[in-house]
């Protein structure tokens, strides 16, 4: 009885969540003003110059955000664990702060700061990196924190120091290799967030990123927008599903060794 | 306070996808008795306990408590108190509320529950902690509360599923003695499952040694130790030397010593000799050399090697062991405690 | 002299580790703290001097309607999302962590909850928009007009579409609480005489209540702060606070109201902060239990 209810409910959820995806597939392959199917909208993803630029910009932004986030956050978190444990709460609070301050609010207040950013770095979409690092901070912090908590950072650092390693070696050669799962999951989540980010990109100066382009095309060609939306969702889904398999394997191998 | 209820497990069988966890287990527990099931992990002891609790179903066989057949009774109607390995307290309830939980389910009034919870906490020595939450207690205290909670409903049977294995060594010894004291006080029929032989021997009226889903032997702790019925029991309970032996009638000949052989001994093979049955005497003409001496407090354990390479472990009073030094030649005498002879593997 | 130098060394040894935090703190100062302070201060300014003009504007009918609709939208989707998300999480927790079902649900939830935005809006336009697949199907096969008067682009539509990311968010934030439930608790309750219903009502419900309420608040804050989906779906008018901020930022400045966006943003911060503080309190309580 309970089994039947379980599967019936799962089926209901599946319908609610998959019908829009199937509808997108249907919508994006329609021939305008006629019957039959066409892949024109999907081809446009690789041909339309505005779209390809937008896709390129979004991917570049994703990479830059991940790199800057790691460079800024990981050494800081390791440093806090080793030398400044009293600051743990403060850093955690700061990192989780963007969950409490909506992106829209930051957008409203950041225009002055971005006047300087544009002055130094120009108007390429890449400048959004600075804001996106703040945006992904809470999620990255949680992923890295979970990984750092699973190893004994202080003992590892002391062992390496006693063998003559400097702080740079301790962080880069000893600790980072041991927190790869956390680094990877922080990176994946950041990529997914950046690829979908619309608030900053549209309101800070209409930078041509993928979500902005999707919204723009929506006003002229719905099919292209829908195709691009579905593509970016599928891309993110594959990314996160892959991450779950990687993470699962790590956890399992850890379980057998202990 | 409780006259105790007899428990019978009759020919229980249980397999998990081809693996036999229980292979015809039959066990009688007398009213008020504490039986400990002892065995390595995967021997089926926990399965037996969970089937008695009703948390798992046997493929075949019968569970009888107080003469009534409970085989098909659901777990919540079996009237059993169970203590789990760890972390079984409800974290959102205080200690006193945890203890009173079962009474609440049974529809007792608040006044009765409060009074009974108080009594139970007195019994386990935690009256002061009644208003705390489980996370505020140590592991040992949590297990005391779990015991109080299980006993609060005055169950027909008390079930203890490795209740001490998550605790520190010192707390473990302390709490195990206390569990026994409380069990004797309330007189509830008890099944206790553990993989720790010392624990089993210390608290049980009778110990049942299990292996591969079967009961190898069930006997009082002293009988189990001095007269193991099978090689498995002899090896699993206590330490044993394996010394070549031949059997002549009911006498085993081990290294020239004539010792009574236990029933069930093989014709020839190795005798399983306890370390405390080995006497080591310093003797320049002795056949063995002392290789290690481990000081354990009042007792010491001495290993020596025979000239053919066999190592023998002896246990003696530390005052006697002082006379020995590494490299000494010693003579080995065996006490006339009966031994079990098993085929040499 | 010697003590002074010793003091200097001591000071340096204490300060040196703190220097390691400078880049991180400086970054957050520039890109998080300054923008926030600008908003908070800007809300109380007009033409460079202190003024309550913009705060007063929040009391006007249009602002109050927008706030009311935002609360309605966030509240309804938080409750629907929390209930349905908890049910879905419960369905998933029955499967092993390594099972494909669990992985797929968790990963897809991540996609819908965290990267959705604009894409989700177009997903629903393609489904029940004017020429959406489901709309077409109903129109041609069942003779039912799903489109109505374009309800998808008004509050009812927003509620439906927001649930599409609220339910998955609930799955993600509520799963850890469900994972904290130990099988021993059920077994202990059962051996003490609890029926299935008693275990549910006397153990599970009180145990999960703080986490459930906390997650509901988180969903509320999430919906309240969300912008992209609504922005892509609703191109004209500003039924909710985030869209009003868009209007204030992008349209020609209403005379004497340069800082209306700041005031609206302040309003948003106040609501979200209050909700998140309550969330923190509730979660801390259940985290203590479920350690």
Image: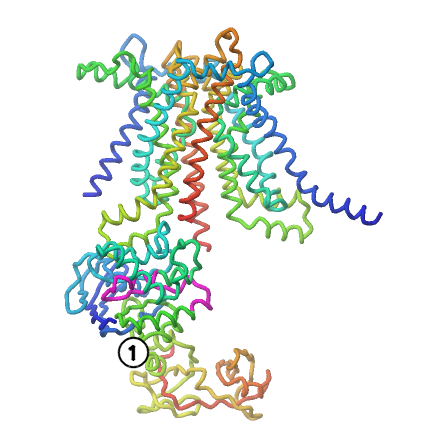
Element on which disc 1 rests: strand
| Residue pointed to by mark 1 | B219
Q: Quadrant of the N terminus of chain A?
A: top left
Residue at the far right: name it: C1
Asked if residue B214 lies in the magenta stretch, the reply is no
How many callouts does the rendering have? 1
Residue at the far left: name it: B68
Seen in the picture, residue C241 relative to B252 is either above or below; the reply is above
Residue B303 in sight: no
Q: Nearer the viewer, residue B126 or B343?
A: B126
Name the residue at 46% across, 54% down. Answer: A257
- Label 1 CA crowd tier, 10 Å (few <14, some 14–19, many 20+): some
Q: Nearer the viewer, residue B36 or B289?
A: B36
Seen in the picture, residue C66 relative to C82 is either above or below; the reply is above
Q: Residue B290: horizontal and vertical position, in percent?
A: 56, 83
Q: Callout 1: residue from which chain? A: B
Q: Residue B38: horizontal and vertical position, in percent?
A: 34, 70
Which quadrant holds residue C99? Answer: top left
Which quadrant holds residue A211? Answer: top left
Seen in the picture, residue A245 relative to A214 is either above or below; the reply is below
Q: Residue B61: horizontal and vertical position, in percent?
A: 18, 64
Instruction: Write the start and end of the magenta stretch as one range.
Output: B146-172
């Amino acid at each position: 009885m309970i089994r039947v209810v379980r599967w019936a409910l799962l089926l209901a959820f599946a319908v609610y969540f998959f019908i829009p995806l199937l509808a997108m597939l249907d919508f994006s392959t329609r021939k305008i003003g006629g019957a039959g199917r066409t892949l024109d909208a999907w081809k446009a993803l690789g041909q339309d110059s505005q779209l390809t630029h937008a896709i390129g910009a979004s991917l570049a932004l994703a990479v830059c955000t991940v790199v800057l986030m790691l460079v800024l956050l990981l050494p800081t978190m390791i440093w806090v664990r080793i030398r400044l444990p009293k600051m743990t709460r403060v850093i955690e609070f700061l990192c989780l702060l963007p969950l409490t301050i909506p992106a829209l609010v930051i957008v409203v207040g950041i225009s002055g700061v971005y006047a300087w950013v544009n002055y130094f770095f120009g108007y390429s979409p890449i400048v959004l990196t600075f804001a996106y690092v703040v945006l992904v901070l809470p999620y990255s912090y949680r992923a890295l924190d979970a990984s750092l908590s699973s190893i004994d950072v202080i003992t590892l650092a002391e062992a390496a120091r006693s063998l003559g390693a400097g702080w740079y070696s301790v962080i880069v050669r000893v600790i980072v290799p041991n927190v790869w799962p956390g680094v990877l999951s922080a990176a994946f989540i950041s990529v997914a967030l950046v690829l979908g980010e619309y608030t900053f990109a549209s309101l800070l100066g209409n930078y041509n990123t993928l979500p902005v382009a999707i919204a723009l095309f929506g006003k002229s060609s719905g099919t292209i927008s829908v195709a691009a939306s579905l593509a970016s969702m599928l891309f993110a889904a594959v990314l996160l599903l892959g991450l779950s398999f990687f993470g699962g394997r790590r956890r399992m191998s850890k379980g057998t060794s202990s | 306070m409780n006259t105790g209820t007899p428990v019978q497990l009759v020919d229980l069988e249980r397999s998990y996808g081809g693996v036999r966890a229980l292979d015809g287990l039959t066990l009688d527990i007398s009213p008020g008795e504490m039986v400990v099931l002892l065995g390595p992990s995967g021997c089926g002891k926990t399965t037996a306990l969970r089937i008695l609790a009703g948390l798992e179903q046997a493929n075949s066989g019968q569970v009888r408590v107080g003469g009534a057949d409970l085989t098909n009774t659901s777990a919540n109607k079996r009237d059993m108190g169970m203590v789990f390995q760890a972390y079984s307290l409800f974290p959102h309830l205080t200690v006193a509320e945890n203890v009173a939980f079962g009474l609440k389910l049974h529809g007792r009034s608040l006044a009765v529950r409060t009074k009974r919870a108080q009594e139970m906490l007195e019994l386990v020595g935690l009256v002061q902690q009644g208003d705390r939450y489980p996370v505020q207690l140590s592991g040992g205290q949590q297990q005391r509360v779990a015991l109080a909670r299980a006993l609060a409903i005055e169950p027909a049977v008390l079930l203890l599923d490795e209740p001490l294995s998550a605790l520190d060594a010192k707390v473990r010894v302390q709490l195990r003695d206390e569990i026994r004291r409380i069990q004797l006080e309330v007189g509830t029929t008890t099944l206790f499952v553990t993989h720790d032989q010392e624990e089993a021997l210390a608290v049980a009226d009778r110990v049942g040694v299990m292996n591969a889903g079967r009961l190898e032997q069930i006997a009082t702790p002293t009988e189990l130790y001095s007269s193991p019925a099978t090689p498995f029991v002899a090896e699993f309970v206590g330490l044993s030397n394996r010394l070549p032996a031949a059997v002549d009638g009911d006498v085993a000949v081990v290294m020239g010593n004539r010792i009574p052989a236990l029933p069930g001994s093989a014709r020839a093979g190795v005798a399983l000799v306890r370390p405390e049955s080995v006497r080591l005497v310093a003797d320049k003409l002795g056949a063995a050399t002392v290789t290690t001496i481990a000081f354990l407090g009042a007792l010491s354990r001495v290993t020596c090697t025979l000239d053919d390479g066999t190592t023998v472990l002896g246990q003696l009073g530390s005052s006697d062991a002082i006379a020995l030094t590494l490299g000494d030649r010693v003579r080995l005498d065996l006490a006339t405690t009966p031994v079990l002879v098993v085929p040499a593997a | 002299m010697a003590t002074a130098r010793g003091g200097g060394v001591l000071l340096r040894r204490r300060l040196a580790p703190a220097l390691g935090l400078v880049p991180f703190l400086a970054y957050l100062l520039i890109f998080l703290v300054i923008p926030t302070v600008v908003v908070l201060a800007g809300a109380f300014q007009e033409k460079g001097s202190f003024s309550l003009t913009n705060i007063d504007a929040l009391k006007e009918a249009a602002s109050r309607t927008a706030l009311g609709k935002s609360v309605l939208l966030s509240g309804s989707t938080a409750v629907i999302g929390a209930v349905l998300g908890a049910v879905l999480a419960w369905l998933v927790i029955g499967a092993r962590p390594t099972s494909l079902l669990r992985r797929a649900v968790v990963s897809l939830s991540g996609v819908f909850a965290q990267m959705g935005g604009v894409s989700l809006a177009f997903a629903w336009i393609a489904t029940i928009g004017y020429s959406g697949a489901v709309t077409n199907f109903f129109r041609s096969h069942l003779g039912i007009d799903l489109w109505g008067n374009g309800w998808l682009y008004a509050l009812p539509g927003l509620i439906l579409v927001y649930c599409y990311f609220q339910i998955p968010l609930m799955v993600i934030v509520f799963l850890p609480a469900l994972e904290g439930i130990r099988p021993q608790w059920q077994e202990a309750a059962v051996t003490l005489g609890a029926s299935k219903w008693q275990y549910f009502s006397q153990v599970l419900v009180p145990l999960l209540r703080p986490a459930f309420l906390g997650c509901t608040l988180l969903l509320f804050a999430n919906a309240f702060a969300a912008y992209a989906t609504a922005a892509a779906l609703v191109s004209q008018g500003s039924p909710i606070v985030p869209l009003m901020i868009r209007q204030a930022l992008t349209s020609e400045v209403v005379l004497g109201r340069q800082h209306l966006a700041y005031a609206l943003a302040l309003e948003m911060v106040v609501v979200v902060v209050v909700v998140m503080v309550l969330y923190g309190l509730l979660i801390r309580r259940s985290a203590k239990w479920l350690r």
